[in-house]
Image (cartoon, rainbow, N blue to C red):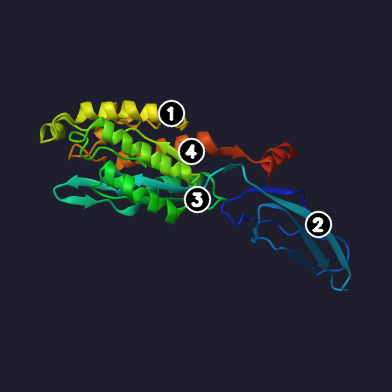
Amino acid sequence: MSCPAAIVRDATTAQGTDVHFESPAPTGGRPPYTVQCDPGSGSVFPVGETTVRCTATDADTLQAACAFAVRVRVSQTLGRTKFVAFGDSITDGKVSLVPLISLAGPDTYPFKLEQMLLQRYPSQAITVSNQGVSGEHLGRGADRLPGVLDVEKPDVLLLLEGVNAVWIRSTAIQTANLRTMITAAQQRGVVVIIATVMPVAPEWEADGHVGAMSSIRALNAQIFQLADQFGLGKVVDLFALFEANMHLIGKDGLHPSIEGQTRIAEAFRDEIIRLYETRSTMSSRLSTMGSPR
């Protein structure tokens, strides 16, 4: 009895993947034959290499055996897997002010981001916790963040906050609050990925929020400086993204549309990939072994 060559598959979940194969056909002996393989076809094979052993028994109870390898690979992995999305109503998932309407969980950027990462890294357990609070300004955010970090214990903080009361509070105070938040995260060993505050529509600014855009621009300039001072690396520039695509802002002129939530998720995803994606040694080694069966 001759077993097939090694089978190579990509992991589809953290447990590995199910692998189907045809049982090897025995020759000689006297039929009928009984062929059993362990693990059997359709079993879930873990990441790594598993030896499948097959045994054939003929009508006279004579036996033959063979074995082959099933290798389950991980093409790429993410160096950090636990994220907290922290912010105000934009993170929480609001789309209107009168009345304030909440998006369904799957429509919010943290949920979308989590699904994007799970799809790209199916062998890993990745979480993106939505810690957005509607109506929160940076002062309250600075007070709330330490408790969130202590409970959630994330690897990475995704920080998107600052539009609430931006036309009222001074840029210096706003910047000081962001500095406090970054420090709180870094003291706990949490990496910070910070985003710029998104633009608002002219009609929203004219409706009792005069000076909002100039204040947002001033705060964003400070966000870039903070990123440099604290060694945060690249800023996720949502202001530039939305300014070039104002249709991503919803009807209220402040909150992103569902499509806008998707674009926020994509922007954070791209930065996470840039920072933390690695190709596994096993995947590189297996790529020299030929195509999967």
For the residues labelled 2 and 4, the Cα–Cα distance comes to 41 Å
In the image, farthest residue toward the left: 207
Upstream in sequence: badge 2 or badge 4 = 2
For disc 2, the marked residue is 67
Residue beneath the point at 13% across and 32% down? 203
Q: Position of residue 160 (x, y in %)?
A: 34, 39
Residue 122 against residue 191 in the figure, above or below? below
Q: Look at label 3 and name its amino acid.
A: Ile
Q: Which element is circle 3 on? A: loop
Q: Mark 4 or mark 1, which has the lower sequence index?
A: 1
Q: Nearer the viewer, mark 1 or mark 3?
A: 1
Counting residues from the N terminus, which is met first, the one under dot 2 or under dot 3? 2
Locate residue 204: give its quadrant.
Answer: top left
Q: Position of residue 82 (x, y in %)?
A: 49, 49
Name the quarter where the N terminus is drawn. Answer: bottom right
Q: Which mark is first along the chain, 2 or 1?
A: 2
The disc label shown at residue 229, or none? 1
Q: Which residue is mark 4?
A: 272
CA gap, disc 1 to disc 3? 29 Å
Name the spot of residue 117 as percent of width and height, x first: 48, 45
Q: Residues within 10 Å of mark 1 (few under 14, many from 20)?
A: few
Residue drawn at x 28%, y 38% as measured from the top left: 162
Distance in Å between CA atoms under marks 2 and 3: 35 Å
Q: What residue lies at 36% left-to-right and 48% top-to-bottom?
A: 145
Mark 1 residue type: Gln
Q: Verify CB contact (< 8 Å) between mark 4 and mark 1.
A: no
Where residue 240 sits, quadrant-wise, is: top left
Q: Which residue is mark 3?
A: 126
Q: Amino acid at mark 2?
A: Ala
Look at label 4 and name its amino acid: Ile
Tell me how far mark 4 sits from mark 1, CA to CA.
20 Å
